[in-house]
Structures are given as C-alpha cells and as structure tokens.
Image: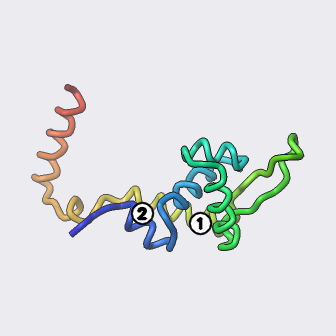
C-alpha cells in the first residue's frame, strides 16, 4: 500500500499537487503571477492557467498590483485559505504505518534518526 502524502492531499482536495503547492505558497501573502511562477519553478504561462483554474474554483482572486499597473496580485480567498490549511493539517499528520508503531518501535526509530542527524 502506498503512503504518498502528495497523492493523498491532491485527491482529498481534488486538484494536482502543483495547485496545492500554489495555494500553500500564497498563505503568507499575495504574490504576482511572476513571483508565484518563480516560487513554484514553473513556466509563467502554466502558472497563469493554474491560477485561472484556482480562480474558477473560488480559491484565489486576482487584484491589481498597487505599485505596478501591468501586474496582478494573486491572493487566497477564504475557501483557498481553508484548502491550504487542510493540506497543511494532512501533511503534518504522520502516515498510518508510522502511527501504528509501538512505543518501543517509535523509540528505536527516534534513536536511529537522531544518529543519522548527528553524522
């Protein structure tokens, strides 16, 4: 059984992982399309199509940039903020196999991870 968190989150939200990343990238502040494309390391035309889709879903809204008449800022709507928060909650939860480990197994795993971090 696969425990790919990207797939789980994408399926739960009904969108591609890149769209999930876009929502998560807009949590801190609205961004221009160019800045969002740079953050996602994606082509600007692709990001424009992605933002069109997110806007149709009611998750983002474009508005004029206050300092640049040629640019638009993309920001989250309340529904977009809720979707981003849901993604964060899901991603912060440990996968089922990890949650099913006994206390002894978790302690052993922690010791191994600490050893790896220290090396």
9 left or right of 58? Answer: left
- Residue at x-position 50% and y-position 71%: 13
Count neighbours of disc 2 (C-alpha within 10 A) and say few if under 14, some if 14 to 19, many if 20 or more: some
Place residue 82 in its image quadrant.
bottom right
Q: From the viewer's side, name the closer residue of 44 and 74.
A: 44
Label 1: which residue? 82
Label 2: which residue? 90
84 left or right of 6? Answer: right
Say if 102 sits above or below 117 in the image: below
- The image position of residue 61, as x and y in percent, is 74, 62
Place residue 11 in its image quadrant.
bottom left
- The image position of residue 115, as x and y in percent, is 17, 32
- The image position of residue 55, as x and y in percent, is 70, 67
Disc 1 on helix, strand or loop?
helix
* Label whose residue precedes the other's in the sequence (2 or 1): 1
- Residue at x-position 56% and y-position 66%: 83
- Residue at x-position 70% and y-position 49%: 33
> Quarter of the image containing the C terminus?
top left
72 left or right of 18? Answer: right
- The image position of residue 106, as x and y in percent, is 16, 51
- Tell me how far mark 2 sits from mark 1, CA to CA: 12 Å
- Residue at x-position 22% and y-position 59%: 98
Which residue is farthest top? Answer: 119
Tally of numbered discs: 2
Disc 2 on helix, strand or loop?
helix
């Amino acid at each position: 059984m696969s425990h790919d968190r990207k797939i789980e989150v994408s399926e739960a939200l009904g969108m591609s992982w890149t769209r999930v990343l876009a929502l998560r990238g807009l949590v801190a502040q609205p961004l221009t399309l160019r800045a969002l494309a740079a953050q996602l390391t994606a082509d600007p035309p692709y990001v424009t199509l992605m933002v069109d889709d997110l806007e149709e879903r009611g998750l983002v809204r474009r508005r004029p940039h206050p300092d640049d008449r040629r640019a638009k800022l993309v920001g989250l709507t309340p529904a977009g903020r809720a979707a981003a928060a849901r993604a964060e909650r899901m991603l912060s939860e440990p996968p089922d196999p990890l949650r099913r480990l006994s206390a002894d197994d978790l302690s052993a795993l922690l010791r191994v991870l600490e050893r790896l971090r220290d090396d």
